[in-house]
Image (tube, helix red, strand yellow):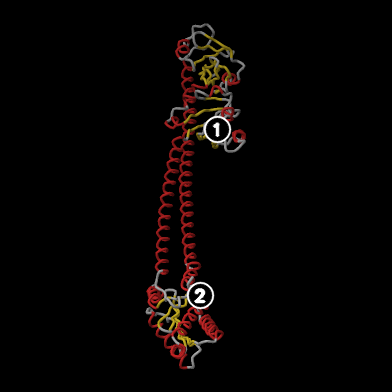
Amino acid sequence: MELSDRHYERKKKYKYPAKSRRIWIIISILLISCCALDMFYYKKIQDGLLEQTYSDLEKESNVARSNLESRLQAKQEWLEMIAAFCDVPDGSGNENWWNKTKQFCTEDYRLEIGDTEGNLYYGDHQSGYVGDKPYYQELIAGKRSISGIQSMGYEGQDSIVVGVPILRDGKVQGAVCAEYTVNSLGKLINSSEMSQYGANLAFTAEGIMVASYPGMEKFGTVYEMLETMEYKKQGEVGRLKKSIASGESGYLVYHNGGRMRLFYYQPVGIRDWYIASLVVTDSYEKIFNELRSMSIIILLATTVLIMAAAVLTAYALKVRRKEIETVKKDALTGVFTREAALQVIQREFAKKGGGSYRVCMFLDIDHFKEINDTYGHDAGDRVLIETGAILKKCLRNTDIVSRYGGDEFCIWVYGDVDSTVLVNIANRILGEYRQAGSVSVSIGIAAAKQGDTDYQTVIKRADQALYKAKRQGRNQFVLDYSK
């Protein structure tokens, strides 16, 4: 391998890979930053949508609770109107309310009239006994009442009874009641627009359904239904029970068949009842999936753009590298030609701040003409080759060494170096020649002054320093480092 080839191999080994590594590090940071920003954006949007879902679900639950409370209150007021005008039940079967009880008797609802003994009349002259029921004892005591769950109370279905006392001259003469099945109450609280995305139900603290919807009849309690679902954490249903036992409201998130469900619960204010709203998050998950897809597309597009920029940058560096590597080198010494070196230095001085090469060293071989005249041009060529080797040995890979002409060599030192470094370089060069013992050299060194934008000015000062070294006896250096 020629000296020039080794010079450029060292250049590639140290200078350009370092730049490439920095570029790829920057690209990696950009990619990681884009990924992080994209994930942060997606997470913020997802959290916002989920928060809005929770808010909508809470509003739905409030609507359902209001429906239940208002319907039961309105029913009690309607029952009081009947109680004010109906005959006192005497068991004769001739009372004026029999047609009413028959009229309001359906498969999930019926009107009932009771006497003070607990005998209850309804439908087509049917009757039953409820005197031992707590809710009826409240009615006979002159209070409005809403019962607890009446297991198998009406047509074999769980039911709720709403009642008011029949008062005559301030005395209780019986009671008027309306009995709802659990499913019929469920219809009352599932009438809002939000209900199309889920359902509402009411239940006791023990989980027994007060107001339900079709499909829930196969479960004994709400908790049994929830136990069949999938949860990210174990013990979620147990935590729900404790929360309800403490009179709290809150959310429960579960999955059914891979689809996420939200469950919001809160106290009703009637007995120990709770009302819950469930929503299937398909519409929200659809938005989440669309956002996820959009985020992936944006991330991929960003990655492609960054990678394209990286490829273009790498290509530009490669072209730049080839440009420098293919520049003409001095065939004899293996260093830059004068033209090649000055082309690089001219570009450096055109940069903002003056570039990275601000110190020029001018070197001349002492008595070189005498060597050629005495020993011939072959000997002179050997001295030039030796000079090229010494300079490359004493200087760094980033410094630019060029043959300026004849026996003159021009060196541009890379970076912001101080006078101590320059003195060490000059002494190292002189020491190599003294050790070789064949010839000596004179060196002039000049640093660019602040505001210098023309490299020729620096070369001229280095040349003047060189001739000063020659006038002072040769085999030495003169440094002009005034900035």
Q: Tally the marks.
A: 2
Tell me which residue sits at (42%, 41%) in the image. 290
Question: Which residue type does callout 2 highlight?
Answer: Arg
Give the image location of residue 166, x and y in percent: 52, 17
Numbered disc 1: secondary structure:
strand
Indicate left or right for 410 with 172 as reference.
left
Mark 1: give few (<14), some (14-19) or many (20+) Cα within 10 Å: many
Tell me the mark number nearer the camera, choosing from 2 and 1. 2
Mark 2: give few (<14), some (14-19) or many (20+) Cα within 10 Å: some
Of 311 and 473, which appears nearest the observer?
473
Q: CA distance from mark 2 to mark 1?
A: 82 Å
Which residue is most to the bottom?
A: 472
* Vertical position of residue 162 compared to residue 98: above or below: below
Res 483 seen here: no
Specify the quadrant that holds the C terminus: bottom left
Of 36 and 27, which appears nearest the observer?
27
Mark earlier in primary sequence (2, 1) = 1
Numbered disc 2: secondary structure:
loop
Provide the residue designation for mark 1: 267
In which quarter of the view is residue 118 placed? top right
Question: Which residue type does callout 1 highlight?
Answer: Pro
Give the image location of residue 369, x and y in percent: 43, 89
Provide the residue designation for mark 2: 396
Of 272 and 461, which appears nearest the observer?
461
